[in-house]
Amino acid sequence: MKDLDLDDIAANPGTAESFEEVVARVASRRRFLKSGLGAGALGFLGLGAGLNGVAQAADAAGKGAQSQSAPSIGFSPVAAGTDDAIVLPPGYAHQVINRWGDPLFTHSAPFKGDASEGGDAQAQQIGYNHDGMHFFPIDAHGGQSGSNSQEGLLVTNHEYITPHFFFPQGVVPANDKWNADWVRKSQHAQGASVVHVRLNGDKGWEPVLDSPFNRSINGNTPMAMVGPAAGHALLKTGADTSGRLALGTFGNCGNGYTLWNTYLTCEENFTDYFGVGGQDEKSVQYHDQAQQAHLQRYKGSSKAADGDYRWDTHDARFDWTREPNESNRFGWIVEIDPFDPHSTPKKLTALGRFKHENAAMTLADDKRVVVYMGDDQRSEYIYKFVSDGRFDPTQPARNRLLLDSGVLYVAQFSAEGGVGDGAGSGRWIPLVLDTPTTDGRKLGDLFADMGELLIKTRQAADAVGATPMDRPEWVAVHPVTRQAYVTLTNNSDRGKDKARWPGGPTHPGVDAANPRAENPYGQIVRWSEKGGDPAQDTFEWDIFLLAGNPHIHPDSDPLSGSDNITKDNAFNSPDGLAFDAQGRLWIQTDGNYTNKGKYEGHGNNQMLVADPVSKQVQRFLVGPKGCEVTGITWTPDQRYVFINIQHPGEGLDVVPSQQEPTAVSTWPDGAKASRPRPATVVIWRKDGGIVGA
């Protein structure tokens, strides 16, 4: 998720109790925040009954889990820093691969330092602003689990472009400076890349450029719409009267992967790309009030027609006045088969349409597939999908249909009903036509069919009273206990949404025990489903950590962090999140890197490792200036971890009169480079051991 706050605008007009208000009621009853989220929280989800119940459920499901042991964290933590470099613990090394513009094929055009390549060249190169990512062992071909740790397919999301580095002029192009080739180039730089990589002795990891698997899946790649909304009238356009064949994917943020070795790429800020064809928005008429409300519910602004890019001025399908349904074909999760370069990616409408961050898959006790998802915008929701069918490793073809049908749920958190200090409860509300709304109707009274409901997922969640959250980002599921963790990255504008709470408090959710009038730091919340079964409709939750630095600002903000956050591991805006096979929780950040004021001591964005049992947190990596640290995946033997560095150098003040403004970063190519380049970083222990252990 780009951290420019361009999309951190509340689009949710609902008045449901926010998560911060729920937290405040829990805090006032149990005062767990001021007590530091300590033993009570561990009793709930660490070493007590809640955890044992999950472990027993996992055992009953055939996972063989007896209890959760604390994973070892065996590295010396690194200090916060502001260098323009990758900083790792002693005993670790890294390599940079798959930079923006690197070749995908033997015949790819070479990257030019002035970024003067056109759209056709970009389609044969690595895309821009790497985000979610997964390593598929080469022997996983055919649906097997795979164990090869020296060769595989690395599938990487490319989320958006940073115009002042991406275009040859080196400055942010004014709206009237866009041209058709710039549009085409930026379309080809987003989506996902499939790169065959191989460990080649002392040379390290290298792309296999003559591999048949290499592929650019971008803003012009044909995609099949599948699931309940496929063929719906709201998905039909002039170019596709069937409503079943979309063109392209973009805004690809976090990711997921399936038990049958396909890749899930998540479309997030799709609204940035649609506009009114260069017209004055004030003079443009919506087709009707329903269309206006629908556009605004996803844009987050009264200027629903205003695109942040100018694709609409050179590609008619991004002008909603000409193609009003085109935007409905984005905001989905896309399933890609990396082992079949001729396959058509699928947009999975059963999983709902919103600003998807990532997709975390697990199995229910009865082998139904469960996928957790966050909607990354301020005051949006957390969702869960449960498949109709059941996973069977002997039926690979049938497994490929599991995400085509099922039930989508939205989370409602409560301060009541939790077991142990600092715990609350919650329920999953099914988004189906028979579900009651908060005003006594049913969703079927608001939506004509399930296709319309899923296209308007946010509106359906509004109607049933889901809990607004502080920008839900990545969800990760523990490999043994199946507890789910979510990063709520921040909500810097709380207190400014007075329209959402007419007559209510200036700062909703704030009381003596929860005094954050704003939430600039973010937190990680975790929950355990009833009986440890992810398919259940109730859960218990607690806060795993509050980010910030309580040792620097304890008087002005006593909740600037929890007791497992110290001056030595302070950070803000947790974003990327993943568990390794031993149960270490890896936390990546995308926040404020000024290292000043309330962010003092945080330094550049970073990656940390946490023990979910003891709640110990240690900083593992610091990234270069102006970057986000994101995307994480391992080789099966865990000797290599891959991460992404997105938007290095972003945040500079662009001076229009300068042809090449000075960047705050020249990573990874150093002083010789004219601009920074997003890239993938491979990390390993010099002694060949497991990373992080």
Image (spheres, rainbow, N blue to C red):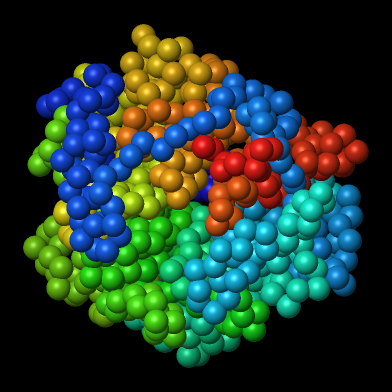
Say if residue 83 shows up in the picture: yes
489 w.r.t. 294: above or below: above
Q: Quick one: 619 or 66, which is closer to the camera?
A: 66
Q: Residue at x 65, y 79 (%)?
A: 341
Where in the figure is residue 658, as x and y percent of width and height?
85, 37
240 w.r.t. 441: above or below: below
Labels in figure, total: 0
Q: Residue at x 81, y 49 (%)?
A: 202
Q: Quick one: 380 or 236, which is closer to the camera?
A: 380
Residue 182 image-quadrant placement? bottom right
Q: Is residue 341 found left or right of 71 in the rendered image?
A: right
Q: Quick one: 562 or 150, which is closer to the camera?
A: 150
Q: Residue at x 77, y 51 (%)?
A: 204
Where in the figure is residue 251, as x and y percent of width and height?
57, 59
Q: Quick one: 571 or 163, which is closer to the camera?
A: 571
Q: Is residue 168 found left or right of 80 in the rendered image?
A: right
Q: Which residue appears farthest toward the top when viewing the image?
A: 555
Where in the figure is residue 260, as x and y percent of width and height?
46, 73
Where in the figure is residue 51, as x and y percent of width and height?
22, 43
